[in-house]
Every structure is written in structure tokens, then in C-alpha cells.
Amino acid sequence: MRPDGDEHGGIFAGGDMVPSERSVTIAVGHGKKASRYIDGFLRGEPYVPAPKHDIVGHERLHLWYTTSAPQRAQPHLPLSERLSSF
């Protein structure tokens, strides 16, 4: 049986089952979202997601911590040395 809120009221699918190959972070987010909708159903108060925040452009970022100093190149070890020194 596939959970369907219209056909099978009161049957829930919640947890960390995530479609396709994704990360644990995505799975936790899906579980959290499912739990909010299930909680709303059980309380008789439908869950209404908060509005999404606007995407902030570079011009609105507070970059007080940046300087005009030139970037420094980070030293790199040759691959052979990295493989043998870990």
C-alpha cells in the first residue's frame, strides 16, 4: 500500500526513507518535515510551513571581516608524499 492522504486517512509515512541516493542530512530533513505534518494532523491543526527567506545577494552581505590583503597560496605536498605520510 502506498500512503495517500486522500484515500487512506490516518496512515502515515514518516522517517528517514529518502527517494534516490541522497545524504543523511536530506533524510533527517524529510523526517522532520513529515513529523510536522503528522503532528498537525493529530492535533487537528494543519501544519503551515513558514514562508521561505529571500535569497540574499552579495550586496546585502555584511562583509566586515574581509580585508583587501592579497590571498596567500596554500602549500601543497606532492601526491606521492601525501599517500605515504597519512
Image: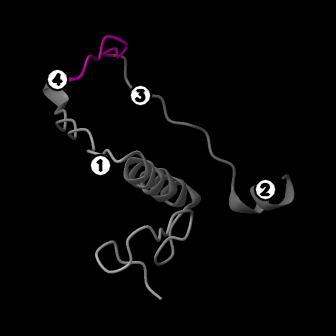
Q: Is residue 64 magenta?
A: yes
Q: Amino acid at mark 3?
A: Gln
Task: Specify start and end residues of the magenta stretch as a single range.
Answer: 61-68
Q: Residue at x 69, y 56 (%)?
A: 78
What residue does disc 4 label?
60
When asked about the image quadrant of residue 56, the answer is: top left
Q: Earlier in the sequence, mark 4 or mark 1?
A: 1
Give the image location of residue 76, x and y in percent: 63, 46
Q: Earlier in the sequence, mark 3 or mark 2?
A: 3
Residue extending furthest toward the bottom: 1
Q: Amino acid at mark 4?
A: Arg
Q: How many marks?
A: 4
When asked about the image quadrant of residue 6, the answer is: bottom left
Q: Residue at x 36, y 17 (%)?
A: 69
Q: Earlier in the sequence, mark 1 or mark 3?
A: 1
C-alpha gap between disc 1 and disc 3: 51 Å
C-alpha gap between disc 4 and disc 1: 35 Å
Q: Which mark is residue 71?
A: 3
Q: Amino acid at mark 2?
A: Glu
C-alpha gap between disc 2 and disc 1: 59 Å
Give the image location of residue 14, x and y in percent: 51, 64
Q: Is residue 34 magenta?
A: no
What residue does disc 1 label?
46
Q: Residue at x 46, y 76 (%)?
A: 19
What residue does disc 2 label?
81
Give the image location of residue 81, x and y in percent: 78, 56
